[in-house]
Every structure is written in structure tokens, then in C-alpha cells.
Image (tube, rainbow, N blue to C red):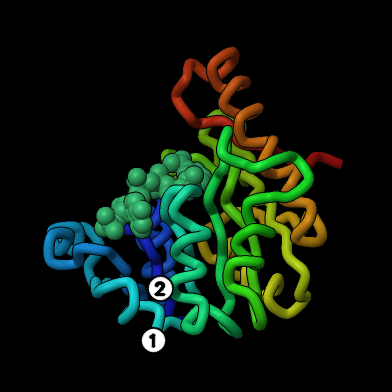
Amino acid sequence: MHIGLIGPGRMALNLAHGWLKTGHSIQFGSRQPQARTHILSDVPGATIASNAETLQTAEIVVLAIPFVAVAPFARQYASLLSNKLVIDISNPFQHLPDNRISGPEITAQAIGMGARVVAAFKATFWETLLEPVSPHTDTVRDVFYVGDDRADKEIVAQLIKDLGFNPVDCGPLRNARILDGMVPLLLELDRRYGSDAHRLSWKLLG
Ligand SMILES: NC(=O)c1ccc[n+]([C@@H]2O[C@H](COP(=O)([O-])OP(=O)(O)OC[C@H]3O[C@@H](n4cnc5c(N)ncnc54)[C@H](OP(=O)(O)O)[C@@H]3O)[C@@H](O)[C@H]2O)c1
């Protein structure tokens, strides 16, 4: 699939590495594409363009920009994002207005009619994106995801599998309220038990 990765930072680069290996095509969207062309030497085959150009051609959009930028971005580009599968990976931390709404629900509201938002990768450290199997336990890491549309979630589950992770469907988009809180908790656990190395993951066990 042709994936537009908005925000060519740490998460986007590692997602691109994994998806390029499994045959997807990648375009990064940036506010300053000219100033970011150096990143392409690290991801052969990927391209970079302005955010608007990237949104125009992408089949799937990943919002890999800071949480505070997501809602303004979604409002600005609502017409290009509507009716397109949007994967929101952003983490709000202290910026949520209250605990009765999640980041991805705010993103969907900002897009408005035709919003197709799935949240995923929120609790996946960028440091582990290229290490889907934990070298310490030989366990495939889980990626939790939520969304309201079954077909969209199947696409996202396949994209997660393409990176070598185990997708775990955590229910409707509103359950992102819980995922939002699992990220600061994972950071706390990482400080206590993971040497602050960002190599821990949540794992659903039977
Ligand atoms: N780091 C992690 O381990 C991790 C894990 C899970 C989820 N996340 C989430 O993933 C998202 C990206 O994290 P990251 O660590 O990859 O961040 P990052 O390395 O700082 O990259 C973010 C990118 O967003 C773009 N950007 C910055 N401010 C923007 C704005 N106001 N409007 C539009 N674009 C803007 C920048 O690209 P340009 O300047 O080129 O436009 C930048 O390269 C965040 O929401 C974060 O919460 C991160």
C-alpha cells in the first residue's frame, strides 16, 4: 500500500524501514521537505514531500507528529483526511483536556465527517520498532490498536504483522482512553525495571 508518514521523526523512520521491507511504498510528509531530504539516504525507496502533497496521494496516513499538533493538523487538512484511513500514534500525556475523551477521538472530531481513525503503536517505543521479537524473552511484542471500523482495523492489523509484531484488537476507538494512560505507566515501569532504555512492551498472555 502507499503509506504517507506525516512527521519524518523517529517513529516515522522506523515504521518506514519495516514497511519498505514488506513491499509498501512510503512517502514522508514534512513542513520543510527540502530541509529533510537527508533522511532518505537511510530509507532507500522512500520519498518526501510537503504534508499536503503527501496526503493527496497516500492510501493510508500515519500521523507521527506531536499530540498538540495533531488536532490543528487534522482540522487544517480535514478535506484530505476525510474518508481515508488515518493511523494516530500520538500520545497526549498531560495535554488531554480531561479523562472523558482520548487523543484519537479528538483527532476524529477534528477531521469531522468521514473520519476513519485507528489508533496504534502508542505504547511501542521507537527503539523497539525494529525489534519486534524481544531478544531477552524471544517473545513477539504486541501492538495494541483500537478503532470503530472492522475493515480498517483489519488493514491496520496486517500492517502491524508486516512489521513482525502481534496485533491485539483492543476494541472501539473510545478504548484509546485506556491506551492513552498505558503509555505513561509503561514509562514509569521502564524507569523502575527497564533501566530507562525504552525496551519494554505490554504483552497480553493467555
Ligand atoms: N518516540 C516514541 O517512542 C513514541 C512511541 C509511540 C508513539 N509516539 C508518538 O509518535 C509521535 C511522533 O513521535 P516521535 O518520537 O517520532 O517524534 P519526533 O522524532 O520529534 O518527530 C516528530 C515529527 O513531527 C513533525 N512536527 C513537529 N511539530 C509539528 C507541528 N507542530 N506540526 C506538524 N508537524 C510537526 C516534525 O517534522 P517536520 O518538522 O519535518 O514537519 C518531526 O520530525 C508523537 O505523537 C509521539 O507521542 C512516540
Residue 85, image x and y in percent? 58, 76
Evaluate whether residue 129 shows in this view. Answer: no
Which residue type carries mark 2? Gly
Location of residue 82 with respect to 26 vertically, above or below: below
Give the residue displayed 75% in from the left and 60% down from the top.
173
Q: Earlier in the sequence, mark 2 or mark 1?
A: 2
Kindly indicate the quadrant of the structure image that contains residue 99. top right
Residue 15, image x and y in percent? 42, 58
Beta carbon of the mark 2 residue lies under 8 A of ligand 1: no
Please indicate whether residue 82 sits to the left or right of residue 179 in the image.
left
- The answer to which of 163 and 38 lies nearer the viewer is 38
Location of residue 50 with respect to 83 vertically, above or below: above
Evaluate whether residue 151 shows in this view. Answer: yes
Give the residue displayed 39% in from the left and 66% down from the top.
5
Instruction: Find disc 1 in the rendering and name its residue.
Output: 57
Instruction: Find disc 2 in the rendering and name its residue.
Output: 4
Please indicate whether residue 57 sits to the left or right of residue 90 in the image.
left
